[in-house]
Amino acid sequence: MALKKLILISGSPCVGKSTVGKRIFEHYENSAFCDGDWCWCVNPLSIEDTRVRNGDRNMAYLVSNYLKSDFEYVVFASVVLTDPTARENILNNIDAEDYEVLSFQLTCTEDYLKPRHDERGLSDEVSFCWLQLPPYPGETVIDTDAKTPDQVCDEICRLIDSKKVKALKTVKKTASSKKATAKKTTAKKSASKAE
């Protein structure tokens, strides 16, 4: 049986993470989508604010539930994935099993980021510092300049389907969890026989 896929989409604000994440979610059957903004929306936005680590746990909980519900593809898009500490905190708090993590960082030039920011009608100043952050080790970088969200989605899905992207992490069912499952099954059978 193929492992479920947790597809991470990271990158700067306004680079297109949510839009592309939704397109990937729509592309795959038996999929779920989590936008980090649902679980982590604070003002002002600062990854260094220790209070937002509570949001990391919210994201891990939601992603865990999707994976445990046997969705074959779980797409998770969030700006916090650009921060290695936040990313590790989220991934380490996912308590699901039998999945692999595929990670993509969306990037673009300043000439493309500014119009995307302005199109959203945001009142704050566009920040280019996020574009300077290095990709997470092993993450696949996707340049979104002059590409539509559908084109970016197609590029990512081709990489996933052709297995040309290496998993950052693979989580398989452990021997102890297999024993626990076997004990539960035996207990259920014993209980039903007793009735």
Image (cartoon, grey):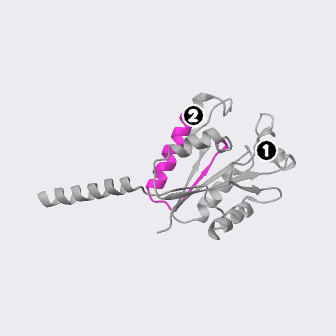
From this view, report whether residue 135 is shown above or below residue 189: above
Write down the quadrant of residue 125 in the picture: top right
Task: Give the numbered dot on residue 131.
Answer: 1
Callout 1, which amino acid? Leu
Instruction: Tell me what residue is drawn at x 56 percent, y 43 percent.
Output: 90
Q: Is residue 73 magenta?
A: yes
Q: Residues within 10 Å of mark 2 (few under 14, many from 20)?
A: some
Residue 20: percent from left, percent from top: 68, 56
**Marks 1 and 2: in contact by CB < 8 Å?**
no
From this view, report whether residue 119 is shown above or below residue 72: above
Instruction: Tell me what residue is drawn at x 79 percent, y 60 percent.
Output: 147
Residue 57: percent from left, percent from top: 52, 39
Q: Secondary structure at mark 2?
A: helix
Write down the quadrant of residue 42 in the picture: top right
Along the horizontal axis of the image, is 190 left or right of 44?
left
Residue position for label 2: 53
